[in-house]
Amino acid sequence: MVVQTEGVSRGLLVFLGIILILAGCAAIGMPMVASLTVELLIGWVLIISGIMQSIYSFSSRKWGKFSMRLLAGILYLIAGMMLVAHPLRGVLTLTFLLGLLFVLEGLCKIIGSIQIRHVLNWKGLFLSGILSLLIGVLIWRQWPSSAVWVIGLLVGINILFRGWALIMLASALPSGGSAQRSAF
């Protein structure tokens, strides 16, 4: 979704791009630190979500809705507290789940691409599915040792590419131009 607001300057996009590239390189260079940071962030998000969900449950007028919302809030809270209290175990669990996500995503892409094989360029989706499946299998084959580097490396690569994307966006702007501010 693109939000129409005052433009973002070319210089600001380049600055943010450079910051993200440096942060991405740091995460790639120190994947365990980045993995623990992501794990702790997820833990705190779950804790805050659990608290908010539990508070929200009291707005329910029916016992069934109240109890289900409260239970969900308590589960979020417990999961978040476990991640924050035991970050290394959390990284192991999240890495295992990430491998599962890649495997399932790969299988879905492969099946989906076969179902639309009559469409031009379906092979790109098929190849993407194969790569996702392979990444998931590689994560699992090296698990639990892959937990030390996988999340941090993938987050670092993502941040790095986001930085390059901002710099490329800035270079595409006319001199003195501005871009629409994106919600992403």
Image (cartoon, helix red, strand yellow):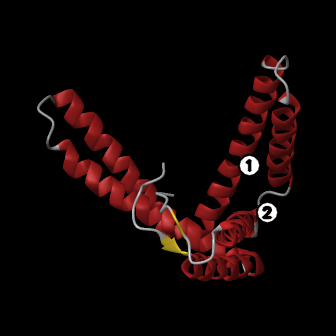
Q: Position of residue 70 (x, y in %)?
A: 26, 43
Residue at 51% across, 69% down: 40
Residue at 63% across, 68% down: 173
Q: Which of marks 1 and 2 is nearer the N terminus?
A: 1
Q: Pointers 1 and 2 in contact (CB under 8 A)?
A: yes
Residue at far front of view: 175
Placement of 29 over or under 141, stated as above or below: below
Residue at far left of view: 61
Query: Camera-side residue: 15 or 58?
Result: 15
Placement of 178 over or under 104, stated as above or below: below
Query: Which corner quadrant of the image does residue 49 belong to?
Result: bottom left
Looking at the image, residue 85 sits to the left or right of residue 15; the answer is left
Q: Position of residue 177 (x, y in %)?
A: 56, 72
Residue at 45% across, 55% down: 79
Query: Which corner quadrant of the image does residue 118 belong to?
Result: top right
Placement of 173 over or under 77, stated as above or below: below
Res 131 visible: yes
Q: What element carries label 1?
A: helix
Q: What type is the residue that disc 1 sits on? A: Gly
Q: Is mark 2 on a helix, strand or loop?
A: helix
Disc sitting over residue 22 in the figure: none
Q: Where is residue 63 in the image (x, y as percent from the top left)?
A: 16, 30
Looking at the image, residue 60 sits to the left or right of residue 71; the answer is left
Query: Camera-side residue: 183 or 137?
Result: 183
Q: What type is the residue that disc 2 sits on? A: Ser
Rounded to the nearest angstrom, the CA distance separating label 1 from label 2 is 10 Å
Residue of label 2? 146
Q: How crowded is mark 2: few (under 14 residues within 10 Å), some or many (20 or more)?
A: some
Q: How many marks?
A: 2
Residue at 54% across, 80% down: 12
Res 86 visible: no
Disc sitting over residue 99 in the figure: 1
